[in-house]
Image (cartoon, rainbow, N blue to C red):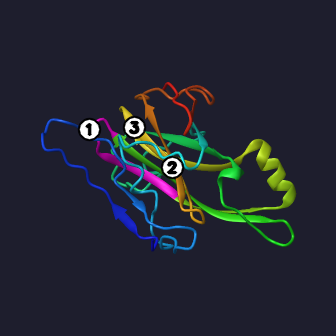
Amino acid sequence: MDGGYRRIEVRLKEGGFDLAYRHGYFAGDSAASEPKENSDPLHSLLVRGAPASTQIVFSARLALADRQPAHGDNVAGGNTQLLWPLTRYRVHFNLRPDDLKLDISPDGRRAGKIQVGLLAYDSGGHAVNWAGGTMAISLSAEQFAAAQRTGIPAHLEIDLPRTEIFLEAGVYDWSARKAGTVEIPIRAVNVIAPAGEGDYDWSTRQSGKP
């Protein structure tokens, strides 16, 4: 229970099957050390076809970004070798504060840290782009009361090729070492729709239809 990552591998005596399972977990309890600051605790959980993690309940709203990329623009995401044309998406995360471990200071302020991430796969299961980052949370008593009604927002943008894509979205709580993940299938987008069209809502507790 040292907070280290434990890999899981499932093998069958007979072939011809596709297995979907979590490929690992962090071994630890409340007293164990957390993953290293420069590590990415979500990477091993955002696996195409793996069961969703529901330790953290959140919703993810997928929409076309207000500004679409043009040739010569920097790519939104970690894969700078993407081939054009591209469509830029914005994913709006919304988290329930009660699902997060937020430390309370004497003045009533609640603070914590989360990791949000996206990992996109093509229909063949190959990673095509990824995005993510760490977000510090600091809420006054009034802000926390409001967040209990409306949730805690987070946003990421990612550029994707105009083909069938499976977008894995996830949230990780650095203090509680818990995660939530959800898969968002995306149809090919060849014509940019007006803002608000083609938006989809997804949650770790429900399935949506693209």
Using the image, determine if residue 94 lies above or below residue 32: above
Relative horizontal placement of residue 41, taking residue 63 as reference (left or right): left
Nearer-N-terminus badge (1/3)? 1
Could you tell me which secondary element the residue under label 2 belongs to? strand
Could you tell me which secondary element the residue under label 3 belongs to? strand
Could you tell me which secondary element the residue under label 1 belongs to? loop
**Number of other residues with Cα within 10 Å of mark 2, as a class: few under 14, some 14 to 19, many 20 or more:** many
Residue 8 in the image, given as x and y percentages of width and height:
31, 56
Relative horizontal placement of residue 71, taking residue 180 as reference (left or right): left
Q: Quadrant of residue 125?
A: top left
Circles 3 and 2: CB atoms closer than 8 Å: no
Residue 188 in the image, given as x and y percentages of width and height:
40, 29
Query: Label 1 sits on what residue type?
Result: Gly
How far apart are the two marked residues, 1 and 3, measured between alpha carbons? 10 Å
Q: In the rendered image, which residue does mark 2 sit on?
A: 170
Q: Is residue 128 magenta?
A: yes
**Number of other residues with Cα within 10 Å of mark 3, as a class: few under 14, some 14 to 19, many 20 or more:** many
Q: In the rendered image, which residue does mark 3 sit on?
A: 166
Using the image, determine if residue 109 lies above or below residue 128: below
Residue 74 visible, this angle? no
* Most foreground residue, 23 or 157: 23
How far apart are the two marked residues, 1 and 2, measured between alpha carbons? 21 Å
Which segment did they paint magenta?
A: 122-132
Callout in the foreground (3, 2): 2
Query: Label 3 sits on what residue type?
Result: Phe
Q: Which residue is pictured at 51% across the width and 49% down the height?
A: 170
Relative horizontal placement of residue 182, taking residue 15 as reference (left or right): right
Q: Which residue is pictured at 49% across the width and 46% down the height?
A: 169
Using the image, determine if residue 108 lies above or below residue 85: below
Q: In the rendered image, which residue does mark 1 sit on?
A: 124
How far apart are the two marked residues, 3 and 2, measured between alpha carbons? 13 Å
* Most foreground residue, 111 or 128: 111
